[in-house]
Image (cartoon, helix red, strand yellow):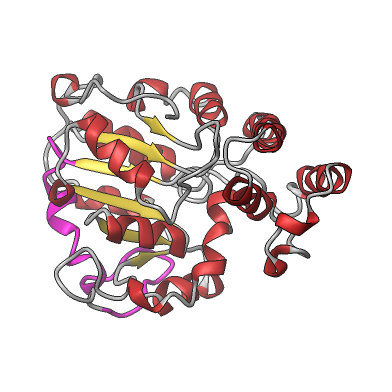
Amino acid sequence: MGDETNGGAYGGVPEVMGRGVEGPVRRGAFTSPAGPGTRELDEVRALFADPAGRCVLFDFDGPICRLFPGDASKDVADAFWKLVSERGLHDVIDPADLHSKDPYDVLRDVARERPGSEAVTAFEDLLTEGEVRAAQCAPATRGAHELIRELWRRGARIAVVTNNSPRAVASYLHRHGLSDAFGPHIYGRGPDADQLKPDPDPVLRALAGLGAEPGDAVMIGDTVSDLVAAREAEVRFVGYARDDREAAPLRAAGAGAVVRALAPLIGLLKVPPQGSQGSRGSRGSRGSQGR
């Protein structure tokens, strides 16, 4: 749900090919479960090889954890449709979303048709509450915590760029002892629920908050909406997919680097650790949680 599924609706966007970076991203052999192939990471290898002063942006739901595994989002989705009925908002829902089980589709529709309304606030509050509850038990993505800690130790500037609530992200990071690694650099859904990915807004806010240039950054995401946002912000992209089914839409949209595991990326970090506190002096200070 959320970042994990929102990209599905954009899987057929043809203009993602070759936008934002120097021409189309090259496609290589698909990764094995053991880790990325050599050609897969040509576009981003240099960024990982010298992480000090570089910037790595993580999508939250998928690359860091599974916020709503299985059908865990059902209760939130049911509550959303109940609210749609109570407020008579069926007419503002895109026909393509009328049978959606993803509340993010509904939230996007309401925010588009009723911007700044009390209805948007009600839906956003309901979704945030569900996300915060889910963050208390969300399973970690294998290898994600290790990669985050190593990047931080080696001086990389890291941030979360997500369509989820910053409150849910902060709750999850705190529970797993990762808050210091990110500091204030959580760029998520604002109270108006506008400018969600694939809009590049959260990516651009992260770059500004970290004081980073697009060429110094790489984003790790698991949906086409992540890929589009990264391309629009001129940031390199590494796709994360657990299997061929999840990799297919990323491949179709032109993702050149897709990995099935995150832990092997640690092997690309060639620079020795700078100490347990990371290179704090290089981090930006303008980041904020949310908008």
> Where does residue 69 sit, x and y in percent of width and height?
67, 50
Q: Position of residue 79 (x, y in %)?
A: 82, 42
Residue 51 painted magenta: yes
Q: Is residue 211 left or right of residue 33?
A: left
List x then y, in percent, for residue 7.
51, 62
Of 53 and 204, the residue lying toward us: 204
User: In the rendered view, does 230 fall on the left or right side of 274?
Assistant: right
The answer to whether residue 254 of the structure is visible from this angle is: no
Q: Quadrant of the C terminus?
A: top left
Q: Which residues are magenta?
A: 27-54
**263 w.r.t. 132: above or below:** below
Residue 273 x/y as whole percent: 17, 31
Q: In the image, what residue occupies the spot 60% across and 41% down?
A: 139
Residue nearest the viewer, comparing 134 with 215: 215
Counting the numbered discs, the total is: 0
Q: Residue at x 63, y 53 (%)?
A: 109
Foreground residue, 281 or 9? 9
Q: Quadrant of residue 119?
A: top right
